[in-house]
């Protein structure tokens, strides 16, 4: 929400820019059309102006020169989202011989230590403090991002005028405020921006990327780091370089010191399959994550089960992804306690694009518990085996046929009524 703020010179000003679900976009701050910050990185040398991890902008010791009707926070999305704030800073009143001692609400009677901005390395400790000459000495209250400090974080402790953070982590970045509670309507308050420098942390979009010969393959790493990390891609031990018409690498700035890095193989060849590594390094340390690019089918996912029309067998159904024709399916199942698997080869049918579905009946089941595993093979090898799926007996006869995350089925083998429940260990079937 846009704000119009008026303060006296020397005040600390907070311009909010709290945007929901902005993780995938860069956020910029400008004043009168000039960049202050882009994606959390400063474009100015003025240390008074700090971009917080929640994207808000703090101006310490505001001066008349900070006055502007055009402070813009912009989310660089398909349709840019813009919040514009107005700030008016009144000059400090001239001192006269008749002036009395400053009132308790005057900002000049409180001072923070060690400074208004503190840079600290992950894992170290930091001690923040507030000094005041108010008499009698007021109670000092500490706030983090406008919320009062409490015991929710065992690494943050308060001792009178001092706040200590032990084993600083990236989550401790933010604006720490100390308030001198002296009973006045506007007690003095000052703030310290804590900026944590930390080792890069990488998360990969997918650990295994299924692709095929002749199509475009894409691998993605999301890196969180401060200072910003340098990203290097490897295949095996060899560094990957941009190659026109073959290899493309690009990155984008996200929220909260995150960057997104994408490696594209434009026309995948069999020799391109293998292990790729994304390495992120800054002045604090480094992190590496692996991504497997493969032409083999994806791990099959069980999508349901149903009875045959004569109630003599249960039909299990799977779905998988393959960019090459499927050569073979393998379904193996066994009764609990048995060492030997029964193995069958379901019929192979053409898929729709790269999506394949398969179903197969299991007949002549005896009372008891069973488990089943399914795999698929194409020219590049076998898929990972499906998650084991369990069958168990002793279900009530009134259980009806279902399809979905779990299927309850009735099977009527010759001479007996056997009710079986298919229990899917993984209760959700995410789309491939």
Image (cartoon, rainbow, N blue to C red):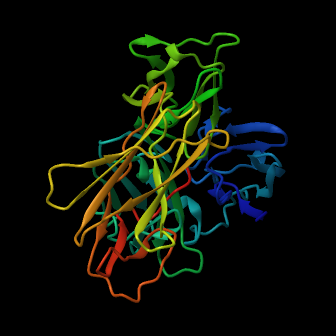
Residue 388 vs residue 346: left or right? left
Quarter of the image holding residue 1? bottom right
Q: Establish if 385 lies above or below 134.
A: above
**Residue 182, percent across and down?**
47, 77
| Count of marks placed on residues | 0
Q: Nearer the viewer, residue 7 or 93?
A: 7
**Residue 293, percent across and down?**
49, 27
Residue at figure coordinates x 52%, y 31% from the top left: 228
Q: Establish if 76 lies above or below 422.
A: above
Q: Nearer the viewer, residue 18 or 203?
A: 203
**Residue 412, percent across and down?**
36, 77
Residue 242 vs residue 142: left or right? right
**Residue 409, percent across and down?**
41, 75
Q: Residue furthest front?
A: 415
- Is residue 192 visible in the rendered image? The answer is yes
Q: Nearer the viewer, residue 96 or 224?
A: 224
Q: Establish if 81 lies above or below 402.
A: above
- Is residue 159 visible in the rendered image? The answer is no
Residue 82 vs residue 411: left or right? right
Q: Establish if 268 lies above or below 424.
A: above
Residue at figure coordinates x 41%, y 46% from the top left: 114
Q: Nearer the viewer, residue 346 or 237?
A: 346
Residue at figure coordinates x 64%, y 57% from the top left: 21
Residue at figure coordinates x 44%, y 21% from the top left: 274
């Amino acid at each position: 929400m846009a704000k119009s703020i008026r303060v006296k010179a020397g005040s600390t000003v907070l311009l909010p820019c709290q945007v929901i679900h902005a993780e995938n976009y860069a956020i910029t701050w400008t004043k009168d059309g000039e960049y202050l910050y882009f994606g959390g990185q400063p474009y100015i040398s003025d240390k008074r102006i700090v971009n917080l991890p929640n994207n808000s902008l703090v101006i310490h010791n505001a001066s008349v020169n900070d006055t502007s009707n055009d402070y813009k926070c912009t989310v660089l999305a398909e349709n840019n989202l813009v919040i514009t704030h107005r700030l008016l800073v009144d000059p400090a009143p001239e001192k006269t011989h008749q002036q009395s001692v400053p009132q308790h609400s005057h900002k000049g009677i409180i001072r923070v230590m060690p400074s208004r901005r503190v840079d600290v390395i992950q894992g170290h400790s930091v001690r923040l403090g507030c000094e005041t000459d108010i008499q009698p000495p007021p109670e000092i209250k500490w706030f983090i991002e406008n919320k009062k400090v409490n015991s929710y974080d065992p690494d943050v402790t308060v001792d009178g005028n001092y706040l200590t953070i032990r084993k600083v982590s990236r989550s401790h970045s933010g604006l720490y405020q100390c308030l001198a509670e002296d009973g006045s309507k506007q007690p003095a308050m000052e703030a310290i921006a804590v900026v944590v420098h930390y080792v890069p942390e990488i998360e990969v979009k997918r650990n295994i990327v299924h692709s095929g010969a002749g199509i475009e393959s894409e691998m993605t790493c999301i890196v969180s780091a401060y200072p910003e990390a340098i990203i290097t891609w490897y295949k095996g031990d060899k560094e990957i370089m941009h190659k026109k018409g073959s290899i493309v690498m690009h990155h984008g700035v996200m929220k909260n010191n995150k960057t997104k890095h994408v490696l594209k193989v434009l026309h995948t060849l069999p020799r391109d399959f293998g292990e790729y590594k994304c390495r992120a390094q800054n002045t604090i340390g480094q992190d590496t994550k692996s991504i497997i690019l493969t032409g083999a089918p994806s791990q099959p996912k069980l999508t349901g089960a149903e009875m045959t029309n004569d109630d003599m067998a249960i039909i299990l159904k799977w779905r998988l992804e393959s960019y090459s024709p499927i050569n073979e399916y393998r379904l193996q199942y066994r009764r609990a306690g048995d060492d030997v698997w029964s193995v069958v080869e379901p019929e192979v049918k053409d898929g729709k694009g790269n999506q394949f579905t398969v179903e197969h009946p299991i007949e002549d089941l005896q009372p008891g518990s069973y488990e089943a595993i399914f795999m698929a093979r194409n020219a590049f090898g076998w898929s990972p085996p499906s998650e084991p799926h369990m069958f168990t007996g002793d279900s009530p006869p009134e259980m009806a046929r279902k399809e979905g995350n779990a299927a309850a089925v009735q099977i009527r083998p010759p001479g007996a009524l056997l009710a079986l429940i298919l229990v899917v260990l993984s209760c959700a079937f995410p789309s491939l």
